[in-house]
Every structure is written in C-alpha cells, then in structure tokens.
Image: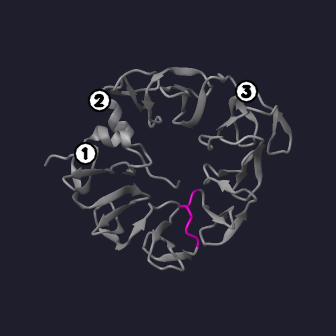
Amino acid sequence: MKYLVPLTFIFLLGSEEVRAFGSASVCLFPVKNGAKWGFMDINDHLVIPCTFDSTLGFSEGLAAVESNNEWGFIDNTGKLIVRPQYFHIESFSCGLAQVWTKDRKYPTSFIDTTGKVVFRCKYPDVTSFYCQRARVFIHKKVCYFNRRGKIVLRTSFPYGGVFHEGIAQVWAAHSAEFIDTNGNRIAFFYEMGHEDFSEGTASVLGQEHSFYINRAGEGIRVPGMSFYMDTLGNPTIINTIDSLVYFPFSDGMAEVCLPGTDHKSGFIDSTGKLIIPVIYDHVTPFNRGYASVIRAGKTYIIDKKGNDAGEEGPSAFYCKKCSCK
C-alpha cells in the first residue's frame, strides 16, 4: 500500500497539527491513503487502517477522528472510545476535550476520556484547557474556567491568550500583563505584542518606555528593543540585537527573525548566542535535537549546530510524547 502523505510532509506540519501518541514502544502518526486517514509507526508500518475521513492526531492517548461528518475518539489500537457523534471537537488537553453539539443554549461541552460530559458551556468563544484553565470572553473581558466549569479568574482586559507553563498574557490597546493561574501579576508592560512563556522564559518588547513592572512590583529598566524575562518578571537574556525579532524557546533553541517581506530566520541557544545564522526562508521549532528548515526552495533537517542531520533526524523528531498542554 502506498501512502499519499510521506513522512517529510508530516514532519513539516509541526507539532500543533500532528500529534503523536508516544511511549517507549508506541509512536503513531496520521497517514493518508486516497481520501482516508489512518496511523502508522515510525517504521512506516500501518497500525490503524486508513478508514477515517479526517483526524486531529493523538493527544493524551486518544485521537480525534471523523467519520460521515461526525467526530469521536479512538485509542492507539483503533478502538472507538467515544463514538462519532459531534459535529466538531478538539483534542484532549488536561484530561478534557471540547466538543460541539447542536444545543443552542450550550453550544459546547467538555468530556473526559471515557466520553462522560463533565460540564456544558453557554459561551461560544471558549478554548481548550491549558494548565488547568480555559479562556473565555464574558462581557468583552477575558476570564478563565477551571476544570469543573467554574469561572475562577476575571480580568479587566479585552484580549488574552491561554496559559503556557502556568502563565498567560492579557492585553489592551496600549498595555499588557502576564498573570499566573491564580491571577497574580508576573509583569506589567506599557507595550503589547509579547510572546508566550516557554522553557521558563518569554520574549518581550521594550519599544517605547524605559521601564516595566515585575512580579514584586518593582520598576525594571528595559534593556533593549527585545529581551527575555523569567517567571519572576526579571530580565534573563539581554544580549539581543535590536534588528531581530525573538521567538519562544523549544528544546533549548529559539528562532530569531530578520523581519520584512523576504524575512530570514536562524536560531539562538539558551544563553542568547546566535548559533545558526539568519539565512533560512522558513524554520520549524527544534524538537529532540532537530529542526526542519527551508532555503532556496530546498528542505533540510538540521541539528543544533546547523549541520545537515541526514536520515537520523526525522525519526527522532517524530517520536514525541504527548503531555498536558
């Protein structure tokens, strides 16, 4: 049987679009044959036949699959755990999955891994759970649910993201604040447009004001146009270059980008040192020592020194354990 979605294509989709169910011996990835989807392992063996119309891949041991315009969940053997019955669903995160029904009063619900409804939600604009919190907008303000469906955080900001490593960013037109899952302030900025926390740091901006406020309420001098701060709201990587844009860390490496229509990207290490030059047209985040990069229309898989990884890189990248987002 010849699959129409090769491994290199799956690799380039990235970790958000393709989720693997991983353990020491099991690692499954979506694969398409004709119009149908199934799952194979890293040795190209078909483990679950291509019988599904679509899939979101595995997350927390279950994969969202679509059959006849209805969605449900299967386990890593292909057994249906939640029969297809919803017109849309999200992958499991923090033990819960968001599902959409035709109930006008409660358009979405959250189910557990057995398919049991944990709570129903009357608000249409609610996210999946991240760090035990789900973002929702109530009366044009950002709020957050806990896993029982109770509003535990209310903010005064009209915009906000989900929690990453226990910290979320909320913002208005000319200010932004990082908060923890209890609503405590991590940092307050007089600018917006910062990145989310990853591997203990966040890339933040300091464009217009000379200081910001950290977790302790202290005014901290802005060290540059872009820099990284820690979970206490203090600068941690300040040897940045004003002409570059800095992104979150993944596997100890962070993308840096020269902005513009024909932008180029490279990577820094955890000290802020530029390790891989800013020469690539497109890059994916590092995962288990490897990243996919594109230059002059050609795709490469590189290691953390920028060397071509050959055939060893893809398998190490693919085999990714799922965890609570």
Dot 2 amino acid type:
Glu
Would you say residue 110 sits in the magenta stretch?
A: no
Residue bearing the label numbered 3: 224
Residue 154 x %, y %: 73, 64
Q: CA distance from mark 1 to mark 3?
A: 44 Å
Residue bearing the label numbered 2: 311
Q: Nearer the viewer, mark 1 or mark 2?
A: 1
Q: Which numbered tag is attached to residue 21?
A: none
Q: Quadrant of residue 248?
A: top right
Which of marks 3 and 1 precedes in the sequence? 1
Which of marks 2 and 3 precedes in the sequence? 3
Number of callouts: 3
Residue in the picture at 24% in, 51% down: 32
Residue in the picture at 80% in, 45% down: 215
Residue bearing the label numbered 1: 5
Which of marks 2 and 1 precedes in the sequence? 1
